[in-house]
């Protein structure tokens, strides 16, 4: 049996932490709304490419927490506000892009959409205030001084968060893909563009309100 002190994190906090991050990921947010819209409009492969970008963005926040960047963000409200509004602006730009795209770019897979969606998922999570709050406010409460170094605890717990988030996001994509095939069979190109643009804009407004 591994001694309690030999664990990189307190084994007693692992399950509560995973439950906490699962509940957080199941609440509506920019990732959930955007991924559902991508999968419904462009299909499963495009949605999973976006999920990969989101996962890498969350991993970047995990590393930032390990090296102390997230703590610096907590001490500088102006930086948080800048991050918050940059994230909202990025979502609004995605809404505009969805609206002005030709119908075939929204409804079907084009020449190489997955790399673009991967990059959008990555940038969107680097500018995601919800991810920032999780690593600034939630993560330190599960770290213990009698275990591994803080950076090791941040990486260990953060890896658990990324795994849970990716599982939730993958499930959202698979469900939205099935629902989207039915909806797209009945909708015309301009209708699809309007629905996607309006949905992403609504996610941006919700994010601005919830992270104020």
Image (cartoon, rainbow, N blue to C red):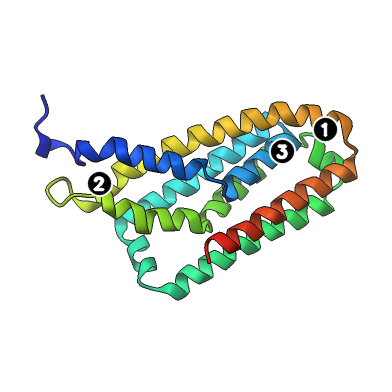
C-alpha gap between disc 3 and disc 2? 38 Å
- Report the mark closest to the observer, 1 or 3: 1
Residue located 46% across and 68% down the image: 80
Cβ atoms under marks 1 and 2 closer than 8 Å: no
Along the viewing direction, whichever of 159 and 177 lies nearer the viewer: 177
Mark 3 lies on residue:
112
Q: Between disc 1 and disc 3, whose residue precedes? A: 3
How far is disc 1 from disc 2 in space, using C-alphas?
45 Å
- Residue at 43% x, 36% y is 164
- Residue 170 sits in quarter: top right
In depth, the one of 132 and 29 nearer the eye is 29
x and y, in percent, of residue 211 in the image: 52, 62
Query: Residue 177, position in %: x, y?
Result: 69, 30
Determine whether 136 is above or below 35 in the image.
below
**Residue 73, how many percent across, how many down?**
39, 67
Tell me the number on the disc at residue 66.
none
CA–CA distance between discs 1 and 3?
Answer: 20 Å
Q: Residues within 10 Å of mark 1 (few under 14, many from 20)?
A: some
Among the two numbered marks 1 and 2 on one chain, the one whose residue lies closer to the N terminus:
2
Q: Earlier in the sequence, mark 3 or mark 2?
A: 3
- Count neighbours of disc 2 (C-alpha within 10 A) and say few if under 14, some if 14 to 19, many if 20 or more: many
Q: Is residue 9 above or below residue 140?
A: above
Which residue is depicted at the point 51% across and 40% down? 26
Instruction: Report the number of numbered marks.
Output: 3
Name the element at disc 3: loop
- Disc assigned to residue 153: 2
Answer yes or no: is residue 64 visible.
no
Determine the image quadrant of residue 162: top left
Location of residue 20 in the rendering, given as x and y in whole percent from the top left corner: 38, 43
Residue tagged 1 = 184
Query: In the image, 201: left or right of 32?
Result: right
């Amino acid at each position: 049996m591994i001694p309690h002190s030999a664990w990189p994190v307190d084994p007693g906090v692992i399950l509560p932490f995973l439950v906490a991050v699962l509940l957080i990921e199941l609440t509506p947010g920019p990732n959930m709304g955007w991924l559902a819209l991508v999968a419904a409009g462009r299909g499963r492969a495009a949605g999973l490419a976006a999920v990969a970008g989101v996962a890498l963005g969350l991993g970047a926040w995990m590393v930032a927490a390990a090296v102390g960047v997230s703590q610096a963000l907590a001490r500088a409200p102006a930086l948080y506000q800048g991050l918050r509004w940059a994230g909202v602006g990025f979502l609004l730009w995605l809404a505009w892009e969805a609206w002005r795209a030709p119908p075939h770019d929204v409804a079907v897979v084009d020449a190489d959409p997955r790399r673009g969606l991967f990059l959008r998922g990555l940038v969107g999570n680097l500018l995601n205030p919800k991810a920032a709050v999780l690593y600034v406010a939630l993560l330190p409460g599960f770290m213990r001084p009698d275990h591994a170094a803080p950076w090791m605890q941040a990486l260990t717990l953060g890896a658990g968060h990324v795994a849970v988030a990716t599982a939730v996001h993958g499930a959202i994509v698979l469900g939205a893909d099935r629902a989207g095939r039915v909806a797209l069979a009945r909708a015309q190109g301009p209708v699809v563009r309007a629905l996607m643009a309006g949905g992403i804009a609504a996610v941006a407004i919700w994010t601005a309100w919830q992270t104020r």
